[in-house]
Amino acid sequence: MFKIGDIEIKNPIVIAPMAGISNNAFREICYKFGAGLVYAEMVSDKAIVYENEKSLEMTYTSQVEHPIAMQLFGGDVDTMVQAAKYLDTHSDCDIIDINLGCPVTKIVKGKAGSYLLKDMDSTVNLVKAVVDSVKKPVTVKMRLGWSEDSINCIELGKRLEAVGVKAIALHGRTRSQLYQGKANWDMVKKLKENVSIPVIGNGDVKSAQEAIMRLKETGCDGIMIGRGAIGNPFLIKELSSIFEKDSVEMPRDKERLAMCMDHAKRLTTLKGERIAMKQMRGLAPWYIQGLPYSTKVKNLLTKINSLDDLKLILDEYELFLNEKYEKYNK
Ligand SMILES: Cc1cc2nc3c(=O)[nH]c(=O)nc-3n(C[C@H](O)[C@H](O)[C@H](O)COP(=O)(O)O)c2cc1C
């Protein structure tokens, strides 16, 4: 257990913010499987200030998804402060996070995300202004630095702690690396040694063994998992059972298929069937990753238009898997 400000995080499993994925449906599943903290997908400060309906909807949280960190991206002090104040008073989120890591060109051109790693003085001023204007704990999520020759996460981390930031999530890559190479966890260890606030390490964790190893090696407080949790909430279950010293049965194929259907239903409630199915065409294949003969089924899943389409494909696949196993078990 660790604390961010006065918010208790029951275990070190932290689920990363992922635009287009970390909505209410995904987050609820992560909590159901035992996550300690889940981040919501990033929201634009200006979109909140200009009351864009979709962005305001993104700040909604349900009762079962706590504690939750809501993430803002933006580069102007004024609108960042206004948006943070909105989250402080109008959203049920527990933590306000500032994005200092997004490498996407559109965001960087808007002088937000990892652009903010370039000019530490302005960034510290911006973050301080946000911290000073809200009651909820403020955290940041950042990368190592802009590029290999301008790594500044340790110095920036120390300065951000000094202005009142309550935790730092560090993705062990530079902006220039985008998603290439391997995440550098030595820097997570170094940051932990240099600040007193909680440090959450991030990058490339795909298995429970890896997560435990990273925690031990770096001494960090939380392990943030992004891509490893898409279509695989069972990883969260496996990890939480380790922390709670419970025994856990890993999911059978049938449970994976049932969870996929559950995700689709939650998304439909959240966004309506048409948009939900559009998103499930990308998400459903993750749930059957690695199962026997999944390639053909994945192809079918990318064409679904309704919950009924999805159910049919999953039911048929389940029958097929049952028959296959029966054959092998004879
Ligand atoms: C589809 C996708 C969307 C993402 N959106 C965000 C975001 O909104 N905010 C953010 O700080 N990071 C975002 N990230 C970065 C992740 O939070 C995380 O730092 C990165 O994926 C590395 O962790 P992983 O190796 O466990 O996936 C996104 C990553 C992916 C793959």
Image (cartoon, grey):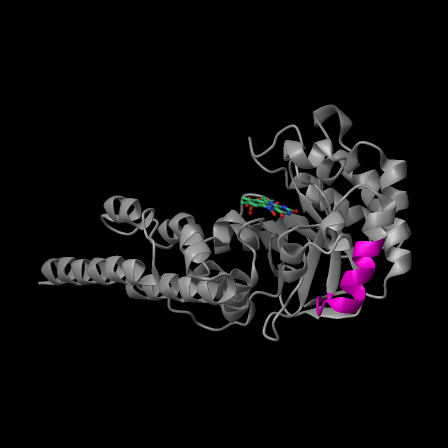
User: Based on the displayed image, in which of its 4 quarters is residue 183 positioned?
Assistant: top right
Residue that appears at 34% across and 62% down:
307
Residues in magenta, as a range = 82-94
Is most of the magenta stretch helix, strand or loop? helix
Q: Which residue is drawn at the image coordinates 55% and 72% (left, top)?
A: 244
Most distant residue in the top direction: 149
- The answer to whether one can see residue 69 in this image is yes
Queried whether the magenta region covers residue 88, the answer comes back as: yes
- Spot occupied by residue 182 in the image (x, y as percentages of width and height): 56, 35
Q: Is residue 329 magenta?
A: no
> Residue 226 appears at what percent x and percent y?
55, 50
Q: Nearer the viewer, residue 296 or 302?
A: 302
Q: Is residue 5 visible?
A: no
Residue 82 occupies which quadrant of the picture?
A: bottom right
54 left or right, relative to 287:
right
Screen quadrant of the N terminus: bottom right
**Which residue occupies 84% across, 33% down?**
119
Q: Nearer the viewer, residue 132 or 277?
A: 277
Quarter of the image where one finds residue 87: bottom right
For this rendering, which residue is in front, 101 or 12?
A: 101
Looking at the rendered structure, the number of numbered marks drawn on it comes to: 0
Q: Quadrant of ligand 1?
A: top right
Q: Quadrant of the C terminus?
A: bottom left
Looking at the image, residue 278 sits to the left or right of residue 53; the answer is left
Residue at x 44%, y 72% (from the top left corner): 247
Residue 310 is situated, as x and y percent measured from the top left of the image, at 31, 58
Residue 88's place in the image compared with 77, above or below, is below
Image coordinates of residue 159 in percent, x first then y, are 88, 45
- The answer to whether residue 22 is above or below residue 249 is above
